Amino acid sequence: MLLGVALASTGATSAWGQPVSPAQQDDNANVVGVVTVPGELLRDRTPPKLDYIMPEVAGTQITVTKKTAITKLDQQPTVIDNNDRQLFNKSPGLLVTEQNTPSQFNLSYRGLGNPQESEYVLVLQDGIPIGSNWIGFPTLYYQPLPQSVREVQLLHAGNSLIYGPEPAPAVNFVMRKPTPGEPSTGYSEHVGGSHGLYSNFNALEGSKGAFEYRADFGYEGKDGWRQNSASRRLQGDLYLGWRADDSQLLSLELSGYHLGAGDPGRISYAQYRADPAVSLTPYNRDWVDRLSATGTYVRESSGGLRLEAKVWATDLTLDSRAAAALSADGAPPATTTLQHEVFRSVGVDVRVRQRWGRGNALTAGVVAYGSDDPFKQWTSPNLQIDRDDRSGLVRLDQARSTGYQAVFVENVFRFGRFHIVPSARLDHEIIRADEFVAPPSVKHPQLGIRESRWIPVFGLGLGNDFGRGNETYLNISQGWRPLRYFDVASPFSNLEPGQAPDPTKSLTFEAGVHGTPVAGLFYDVGVFWMTFRNRLETVAFADPADPTAVAVVNSGDTRHRGLEAAVSYDFLANRPGGAHLLAFGNLSLLDATFTASRLPGQVGKTPAFAPHTLLKGGLTWRKDKAYDVSLTATYVSSQYWQDSDLPGPGSPALPAKIPPYGVFDIAGDVYLTPKLRVLAGVSNIGDKRYYSRIFQSGVEPAPGRSIYAGAALGF
């Protein structure tokens, strides 16, 4: 029988007492075979560092010498009410900017770009991108319910070499799957809370012979704390797997998601100070519908060869209804705009990994992806027009599509305690857009865009195991951000025709040390230096005939450097009884600046959304099947919200910087019986008034204090 769970780092042994090489540290999520050893023995032999970082060889992926972090959701209280602060509390450097409804998700990293819709972060589910369009429109309008997620992986740099476009980082949601041989089990959770919150989550999973299955369904509804911020969200997942033998797995996954939410919009700084709950856009609304299907085949031979092949298809529909804000006397606007976007994508990802020699491993693969994405808008005098009503006046009609192909190879060479990892990837991006109707305010010629780019990226990793459970890492890696539809065919600007800009590229140096030198202690301390070249900006075009003309150009470069550190200590490590008392924290110190720019006076300024200090941490007291209580905190220092570092409009003016803020949360799961547990928590304990999202159009206040409580029953 194949070894399905790799167990070791240097000096570890297998369940049969044989040495296990470092390259055999495959993640449990990628198991094909089954280890027939008792659970206690399995836990005893699993390296402690795998509670904090990814395995050195995770299935077909090589992560040794790359900085990674993981969050195992079974080791913290249940995440309720869309609280990304708690979900990403153990993800160093990842900045969450909060809004009132879950119609989009906003993440950023190291000051690389606006967090709006996570456009500069690659977000994946089981290794498959879940953005609207991986290439032309990399926005995040879907994120799986935390109850359906087993683990959150964060790959800080080198992600462009493993996964593809976006400079850094990659966030990968590893979904829950049944354990081979597991009997049928079920789970039902029901929670109520502040602002009309009611959520439930239900799951059933198990196996029968060679077949395994999991089905779950979740619902989350709330009225929201601001006017017009009510939302309803539903998610359903189905997994079916067949193991022909211990070396093969064939599976099918189906997923459906729906969101309907009001959009309370942004308010002026004066209105925020007077009443942050107010909304001036009572008619605005967003809808998200997503269907996806993924087929996976995994085979691992006794000679160390592993094959993983995935094919997927996704249909994502985004609809919105947006009107201007109410006037000063409360009068409604005259018209509203109904927007309809569809993203129909298909992809295939085939990877192989071959172990060779003493602890070496080679990975290689190919990726192909395509998406068809029509974009339309209508204007209507009906401020509450239904999302399917097409009676309005067409104001925008574009046909858009993208293509992407890649080949990649990577190898880990081991020389005793030293290891070297060279990497290479060749990407090909294709983007097309045809414009049939443009908004009345736009005067550019009718667009017909065809752009194609080949982008090679390379990487090199160096590492050294030393002492007891310690390892140094050095990673030098290139990355890139693809051209988007709006970069080459924005329907909202008077774009001057001309050569399309080059993709934005990054070069990252990251060095550090991590390890588990004593029982209960994990640490990871590293420094980084990143250059971000060919940033894209919209600048005025010197055209006397059209003073409104603009162009999207490569305007300049930025440099991002700093320190990231994480530490966790279990005060009850190795104590009898199975209880844990963990203190944990992570710190990001960032110095980012413009080093070159076509914009006058820009050099030396700090990019937007690049806080100098990002600090997260907490204290967790838990015992399996007994209790799990966490007090967590997030602190974000002040940050500019636009690259100009200038205040915004209004009276009083929007301050140039988002003020610093610190937020505390507490959450707990307590078992009353082995099958019944209660859930409770308070988010934003101190009812801190703050904002982390701000635009020229105003402030979007962050949620205040909320409380929830409920129960969950296993069967």
Image (spheres, rainbow, N blue to C red):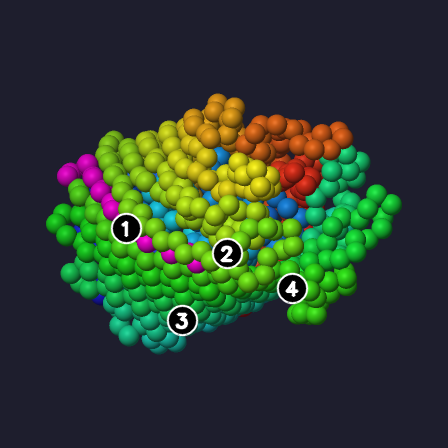
Chief secondary structure of the magenta span? strand
Q: Amino acid at mark 2?
A: Leu
Nearer to us of marks 3 and 4 is 4
Residue 665: image location, x then y, percent: 62, 41
Q: Label 3 crowding class (10 Å Cα cut-off): few <14, some 14-19, many 20+?
A: some
Residue 39: image location, x then y, percent: 36, 57
Residue 518: image location, x then y, percent: 34, 33
For the residues bearing labels 3 and 2, Cβ distance under 8 angstroms: no
In the image, which disc is placed on residue 581?
none
Nearer to us of marks 2 and 4 is 2
Residue 266 showing in the rendered view: yes
In the image, which disc is placed on residue 394?
4
Instruction: Say which residue label 2 marks.
Output: 447
Q: Label 1 crowding class (10 Å Cα cut-off): few <14, some 14-19, many 20+?
A: some
- Report the residue at 32% width, 40% height from top: 478
Q: Earlier in the sequence, mark 3 or mark 2?
A: 3
For the residues bearing labels 3 and 4, Cβ distance under 8 angstroms: no
Q: Amino acid at mark 4?
A: Val
Nearer to us of marks 1 and 2 is 2
355 displayed left or right of 672: left
Nearer to us of marks 1 and 4 is 4
Instruction: Say which residue label 3 marks.
Output: 252
The magenta stretch is 415-432
Q: Is residue 593 above or below residue 368?
A: above
**In-front residue for pair 270/44:** 270
451 displayed left or right of 696: left
User: Within the magenta stretch, is there residue 497?
Assistant: no
Instruction: Say which residue label 1 marks.
Output: 426
- Report the residue at 47% width, 30% height from top: 598
> Distance from label 2 to label 4 (Cα)?
17 Å
Q: Earlier in the sequence, mark 1 or mark 2?
A: 1
